[in-house]
Image (spheres, rainbow, N blue to C red):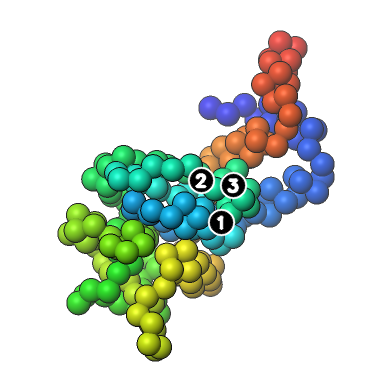
């Protein structure tokens, strides 16, 4: 269990503006929706998706790397890697199994005979939006285990969007609808406390030494 006394002590090492910023962002964070990328080849695409997750309040990003394994591009992520929880998987099956155990429906963002438009999507259920490889799209495994299919309406000659653009459009729309609803979409108090500790740890220099001194003085 997190030590609330330690948390209060650590706050003394942050500016008032930083503390207010943490609290404001935490109030907008959600795990009701999450995102998964499957074997995305271009590094900047995964990094840009992570940035969109942070911008639109998505706390977790699942990255499946059966074929491609790369580090997040810090310049493109623009610091989002500090604030978004990255969960890496070497198997799409393991990722989907964990998501379903956590109560998420699997939403494949790809054209399908049973797909639905953004405006028709049921936001009341927890959902993980899957985005696939730039040229090959989502694997047959994801499609076979998807609970629903989602598409972005397009009226031009171009029939597809870059993965990071698609993710940004979907997340902006879904989170906007979520915040207009009566759904309990925010982090639990326990999750908020956990994130306070995590973000403070990533912000304060000599964090471990400060914590050690705190415990030695008890």
Q: Earlier in the sequence, mark 1 or mark 3?
A: 1
Q: In the shown orientation, is residue 205 left or right of residue 110? A: right
Q: In the shown orientation, is residue 103 left or right of residue 165? A: left
Is residue 63 or residue 175 the one in the foreground?
A: 63
Q: Position of residue 147 (x, y in %)?
A: 24, 62
Q: Residues within 10 Å of mark 3 (few under 14, many from 20)?
A: some
Q: Tell me if I can see residue 31 in this picture.
A: no
Tag 1–tag 2 contact (CB < 8 Å): no
| Marks 1 and 3, how far apart at CA | 10 Å
Is residue 132 or residue 95 the one in the foreground?
A: 132
Q: In the shown orientation, is residue 102 left or right of residue 182? A: left
Q: Which mark is residue 72?
A: 2
Q: Residues within 10 Å of mark 1 (few under 14, many from 20)?
A: many
Q: Position of residue 74 (x, y in %)?
A: 59, 47
Q: Position of residue 134 (x, y in %)?
A: 36, 62
Tag 2–tag 3 contact (CB < 8 Å): yes
**Circle 2 — which element?**
loop
Residue 140 location, quadrant: bottom left
Would you name the residue on which mark 1 appears? 51
Q: Earlier in the sequence, mark 1 or mark 2?
A: 1
9 up-or-down from 141: above or below: above
Quadrant containing the C terminus in the rendered view: top right
- Residue depicted at x 69% and y 15%: 212
17 up-or-down from 180: above or below: above
Q: Position of residue 96 (x, y in %)?
A: 28, 48
Residue 112 location, quadrant: bottom left
| Marks 2 and 3, how far apart at CA | 6 Å
Would you name the residue on which mark 3 appears? 74
């Amino acid at each position: 269990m997190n030590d609330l006394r330690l948390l209060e002590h650590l706050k003394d090492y942050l500016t008032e503006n930083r503390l207010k910023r943490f609290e404001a962002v935490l109030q907008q964070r959600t795990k009701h929706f999450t995102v998964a990328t499957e074997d995305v080849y271009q590094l900047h695409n995964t990094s840009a998706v992570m940035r969109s997750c942070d911008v639109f309040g998505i706390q977790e990003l699942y990255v499946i790397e059966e074929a491609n394994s790369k580090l997040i591009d810090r310049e493109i992520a623009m610091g989002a890697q500090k604030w978004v929880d990255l969960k890496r998987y070497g198997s799409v099956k393991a990722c989907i199994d964990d998501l379903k155990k956590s109560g998420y429906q699997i939403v494949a963002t790809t054209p399908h005979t049973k797909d639905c438009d953004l405006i028709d999507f049921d936001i009341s259920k927890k959902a993980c939006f899957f985005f696939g490889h730039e040229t090959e799209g989502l694997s047959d495994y994801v499609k076979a285990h998807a609970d629903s299919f989602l598409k972005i309406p397009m009226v031009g000659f171009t029939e597809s969007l870059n993965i990071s653009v698609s993710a940004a459009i979907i997340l902006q729309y879904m989170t906007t609808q979520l915040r207009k609803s009566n759904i309990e979409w925010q982090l639990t108090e326990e999750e908020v406390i956990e994130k306070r500790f995590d973000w403070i740890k990533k912000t304060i220099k000599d964090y471990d030494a400060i914590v050690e001194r705190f415990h030695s003085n008890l």
